[in-house]
Amino acid sequence: QVQLVESGGGMVQAGGSLRLSCAASGSILSINGMGWYRQAPGKQRESVATITRYGRTNYADFVKGRFTISRDNAKNTMYLQMNNLEPEDTAVYYCNAAIIRLAGGAYDYWGQGTQVTVSS
């Protein structure tokens, strides 16, 4: 059994900051790529930022310079530091991870999502 649990969402005013966390737990051998995605009401889910096991990052253009993705491999945890938030960042944020299980096999897992609301 493997699960991803996000935390850190909430409501902030425009210009504010939030830090999201995604903790993976269960029968995990290792975690390869991880990423943050978001889905706003009436819109498709979109990629926000991704990070490889070795720390290589990639960001969507709309968050470059404002958001920072990081991970702690020893804790099986990923973070998203979000600064200078804008109302357009309002969405449910999901974490994703490519996990190799102790029992074998590589699987793609999603967290349950955490709501981020930015008021103007």
Image: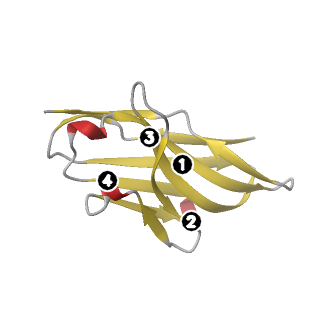
Q: Which residue does the numbered mark 2 point to in the structure image?
A: 73
Label 4 vs label 1: CA separation? 25 Å
Which label's residue is closer to the chain start, 4 or 2? 4
Please state which amino acid type lies under the numbered disc 3: Arg
Which label's residue is closer to the chain start, 4 or 3? 3
Which label's residue is closer to the chain start, 1 or 2? 1
Q: Residue at x 46, y 68 (%)?
A: 57
Please state which amino acid type lies under the numbered disc 2: Asn
Q: Which residue does the numbered mark 4 point to in the structure image?
A: 62
Which label's residue is closer to the chain start, 1 or 3? 1
Q: Which residue does the numbered mark 3 point to in the structure image?
A: 38
> What secondary structure is found at the residue carrying circle 1?
strand
| Side of 105 where 108 appears, left or right | left
Which residue is at the front of the view, 104 or 96? 96
Label 1 vs label 2: CA separation? 10 Å
| Side of 51 where 33 appears, left or right | right
